[in-house]
Amino acid sequence: MRELTYAEALREALRQSMTQDERVFLIGEDVGVYGGAFGVSAGLLAEFGEQRIIDTPISEAGIAGACVGAALTGMRPVGEIQFMDFITLTMEQLVLQAAKVRFMFGGKASVPMVLRTPGGSGTGAAAQHSESLENWFVHVPGLKVVMPSNPYDAKGLLLAAIDDNNPVIFIEHKLLYKTKGDVPEEMYRIPLSQTAIAREGKHLTVVATSIMVSRALEAAAELAKEGIELEVVDPRTLKPLDDKPIIESVKKTGRAMVVHEAVEMGGFGGEIVARIASSEAFDYLEAPIRRLAGLDIPIPYNRELERATVPQVENIILEARKLVRGEY
């Protein structure tokens, strides 16, 4: 199978969707001539023209509002917010309008829109361009939240998100854009509620999201040399959450750790812990459930401090050893 980067997989999903359905269009800051802040939409303007690849003024509220209005009138917009931090400026349009319209109109209206945004740290972009705010939107009824961890999932989940009749927040980690993986050329869709087992193991279940999936897999490869086998579970879609594979994995391993980049307080890991603790998996636990998350501080500009702020491979290895060896 051919390899594509994460960014190329997203671009192919956009291109295929726009070719198949004339209602699909892309709108955002610098998505046209510049090709997007991280190059995802490069070349699409020449293919589809400025009526379907729309450069906007610097107004995230305007981008989100245009998407809501277009979706309500029969289009299937894909909006791009250059950095997830600026999604804070779209809260009225997303939370008060997009998320609630279908419910308030008794299903007679829908908002089939996708809002793509790069999140996370690791590029030296400092406190205002490096946040992980996914759980804000997990908390809002009516929104779906997707976080692909690899190129294959990025394409399949974006195609499914564009097809969905509900508003979808689609979060792409900046450090993943250049990563490569096998991606089929044909159109395929991954359902927006299908947790994946990224690696099978028997000693500890590690539930990881986005960039933390690849770090968990790297940690698993190292720990396997010591005879410790991690089972890495990737939810892919945070909402709606398919928790059955997580619960079954914990029943098998008897231990669980959740790893995400967002700060621990109010983070998605708390929901995973609650799901495990309130399920039949609780009776199988041989150790406390561990959360490994970002520190409760803004992301520093200094590269070493930035790295120390969020979980790294070595942190996962250290905590996994403690859980498996009973050193908690």
Image (spheres, rainbow, N blue to C red):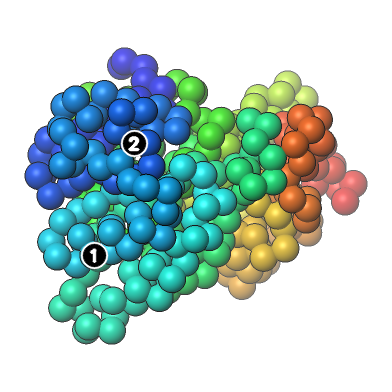
Q: Is residue 138 above or below residue 11?
A: below
Q: How many marks?
A: 2
Q: Which residue is mark 2?
A: 31
Q: Is residue 228 visible?
A: no
Q: Closer to the camera, 89 or 295?
A: 89
Mark toward the start of the polypeptide (1 vs 2): 2
Q: Closer to the camera, 301 or 265?
A: 301
Q: Is residue 99 visible?
A: yes
Local secondary structure at mark 1: helix
- List x then y, in percent, for residue 279: 58, 69
Q: Is residue 10 left or right of residue 269?
A: left
Local secondary structure at mark 2: loop
- Residue 48: quadrant of the picture: top left
- Residue 52: quadrant of the picture: top left
Q: Is residue 20 left or right of residue 107?
A: left
Query: Does the residue at mark 1 contact the one at mark 2 (Cβ under 8 Å)?
Result: no
- List x then y, in percent, for residue 231: 60, 40
Q: Is residue 9 above or below residue 59?
A: above
Q: Residue at x 52, y 52 (%)?
A: 86
- Residue at mark 1 to residue at mark 2: CA–CA distance: 19 Å
Q: Which residue is mark 1?
A: 69
- List x then y, in percent, for residue 181: 42, 22
Count residues near mark 1 (Cα–Cα under 10 Å), then give few for <14, some for 14-19, many for 20+.
some
Dot 2 amino acid type: Val
Dot 1 amino acid type: Gly
Q: Residue at x 33, y 69 (%)?
A: 98
Quadrant of the rendering where the N terminus is positioned: top left
Q: Residue at x 78, y 53 (%)?
A: 297
